[in-house]
Amino acid sequence: MHIGLFFGSFNPLHCGHLIIASHMVEYSSIDKVWFMVSPHNPLKAKGDLLDEHIRLEMVRDAIKYDDRFEASDFEFALERPSYTILTMDALHKAYPEHTFTLIMGADNLQSLHLWKEYEKLLNDYPVFVYRREGFDSSELADHPNVQVFDVPLLNISSTFIRRAVKKGKSIRYLVPWMIEEKIIQHKYYL
């Protein structure tokens, strides 16, 4: 099976993430998207990052009725900080029956040169990139393992959602309803 790996903090998962994942399954060779919940991105500050198990649970709740998607805690058992290349190699070893493709935004492709062993990552694995407003294609977009997609995007971010929650604003229609309920019930991001 061809698995698309969508890495992220998902702090929280929002409708934009789901649109990207859905588009990749429907309009590329990917059969299923695994949401790879990252314990901590080494290129980001921890700040108001919820516990990884809470974020995983929210992702699972949001996608449980869509068999095109799966939530993964694979990185939780790996050495920290987690690096994409090490996770990809470990997944390839653990699931040799699958083909793995990395899904990322054009913003991440622009900064890929900062990632651990990014050349090996590009040479060993296909990368499907979705365009992002305000980010031109990187020279890496010409790499033979990189394929660029036009995906309908919502101009929202997890940061925007956390700030909205802090200000007491509604996040309805920005996140799946079960995530909104959990955030309100547990007073996350306040």
Image (spheres, rainbow, N blue to C red):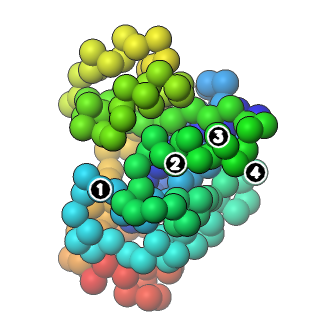
Q: What number is the disc on residue 42?
A: 1
> Foreground mark, 4 or 3?
3
Q: Residue at x 36, y 35 (%)?
A: 117
Which of the two labelled residues, at mark 4 and mark 3, occupies the earlier sequence position? 4
**Residue at which label 4 appears:** 67
Q: CA distance from mark 2 to mark 3?
A: 9 Å
Look at 42% across and 36% down and name the residue there: 104
Q: Is residue 134 visible?
A: yes
Q: Could you classify mark 4 by the number of other residues whose Cα lies within 10 Å: few (under 14), some (14-19), or many (20 or more)?
A: few
2 or 4: tag closer to the N-terminus = 4
Give me the disc on residue 92: 3
Label 4 to label 3: alpha-carbon separation: 22 Å
Along the line of sight, the residue nearer the viewer: 28 or 144: 144
Mark 2 = which residue? Answer: 87
Q: Callout 2 environment at 10 Å: few (<14), some (14 to 19), or many (20+)?
A: some
* Tag 2–tag 3 contact (CB < 8 Å): no
In 3D space, how far apart are the residues under numbered discs 2 and 1 (Cα atoms)? 13 Å
Q: Please tell me whether residue 35 is drawn above or below residue 186 in the rendered image.
A: above
Please tell me which residue is depicted at 72% across the width and 44% down the height of the picture: 95
Q: Is residue 14 above or below residue 185?
A: above
The answer to which quarter of the image holds residue 122 is top left
Which amino acid type is marked by label 2?
Answer: Thr
Helix, strand, or loop for circle 3? helix
For residue 168, side relative to residue 57 (left or right): left
Question: Do labels 4 and 1 touch, CB within 8 Å?
Answer: no
- Whether the residues at callouts 1 and 3 have beta carbons within 8 Å, the answer is no
Dot 1 or dot 3: first in sequence order is 1
* Quadrant of the image occupied by residue 46: bottom left
Residue 28 at what x, y percent from top left? 62, 24
Query: Label 2's element?
Result: helix
